[in-house]
Image: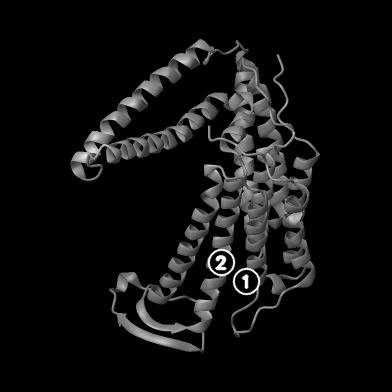
Amino acid sequence: MKGRRGRPGHLHPGAWWVWSLSLGVAASRTSNPLLLALLVTVTAYVVAACRTSSPWSRSYGAFARLALAVLAVRLAFTVVLGSPVPGSHTLVTLPEVPLPHWAQGIRLGGRVSAEALVFSFYDGLRIAALLICVGAANALAHPARLLKSLPGALYEMGVAVVVALTFAPHLIADAQRLRAARRLRGRPDSGVRGLLQVGLPVLEGALERSVALAAAMDARGYGRSADVPDRVRRTTAGLTLGGLLGVCAGTYGLLTAEGGGYGLPVLLAGVGAALAGLRLGGRRSLRTRYRPDPWDARAWLVSGAGAAVAGLLTLAAARDPDALRPGVVPLVAPTLPLWPAAAVLLGLVPALFVPKDPEEKPS
């Protein structure tokens, strides 16, 4: 039996992940701070234009704060532990701690050069941009709808993840409701005594919810599987495992400058093998989907815009590496390459052509 089609206002959540990860690939191909800042600005604008007021949409700010923390830690490590980048512009000289002979190559304190700090800033900004791109995917893609779109071979894992994702929000909501009720009654809601008197009802409610969920899953036939031949089962496992290893190797190749030649073919081969394995594995799952999200023209437009940004930045990194990876010795100001910057602006396509999704309630 086929499920009803999703509502037309919804964009497939997988398209948002393809768009965000593609921008992350583009960020990994450059250390130019102007291009990285432009990429971050594009993600921020699209998130502001397309996200809803749902709880998960606020994760972009958390990822942005995490990115700033990573950048600060990267700079702090350079100041304290030094950097192999040579430099002639000394900013400060810290007291150096003598280390034993077995710790050669490591230093604590010493001279801090402007070249080393700028190099660390470029490198840390690239990692921060990657984190912000992942945060954009978390803010735009509905997690429950994304898991509902998983193939049948990953159905059990998807249900486990959905239960885990919804458990914590329910606990927090119960705790807030009980604390508010205790304050209205003039009873303490903080301290050890208040924590115990709030925590026990919360745990009791979580246990009752778990029992009800188990009964509902059992009533709906969760865990039933069809009989498939052993040969098909072994083929499915081999294709899925080999495909996932290929995806990991291909992704690593795309994210490193040395693997640009083999990264894309290995990634495509891995994706093909993994999809074939997941399709074969889906034969074991006996289930229907209610209102599945269609992969429509808008999903192709969003994912295609992200893929175009990643492809054009990869091409620019191969043709003009000096513009996308500015040097720090000698210390010069970075310049903004025009056509790579125009390629990054293609990431704004979702904000221009995809309307904001309807308001959704957390699952």
Look at 41% across and 70% down and name the residue there. 77
Q: How many marks?
A: 2
The location of residue 201, given as percent across then percent down, is 29, 29
Look at 49% across and 66% down and name the residue there. 71
Q: Is residue 182 visible?
A: yes
Could you tell me which secondary element the residue under label 1 belongs to? helix
The residue wearing badge 1 is 33
Is 336 above or below relative to 183? below
| Quadrant in the picture for the N terminus | top right
The location of residue 151, given as percent across then percent down, is 64, 27
Front one among 169 and 24: 169
Colour pattern of the rendering: one colour
Task: Check disc 2 and give the amino acid type.
Answer: Leu
Is 263 above or below relative to 228? below
Q: Earlier in the sequence, mark 2 or mark 1?
A: 1
Task: Check disc 1 and give the amino acid type.
Answer: Pro
The location of residue 194, given as percent across then percent down, is 22, 40
Front one among 281 and 26: 26
The location of residue 70, given as percent across then percent down, is 47, 62
The residue wearing badge 2 is 125
Could you tell me which secondary element the residue under label 2 belongs to? helix
Is 4 above or below relative to 33? above
Q: Are marks 2 and 1 in contact (CB under 8 Å)?
A: yes
Front one among 199 and 88: 199
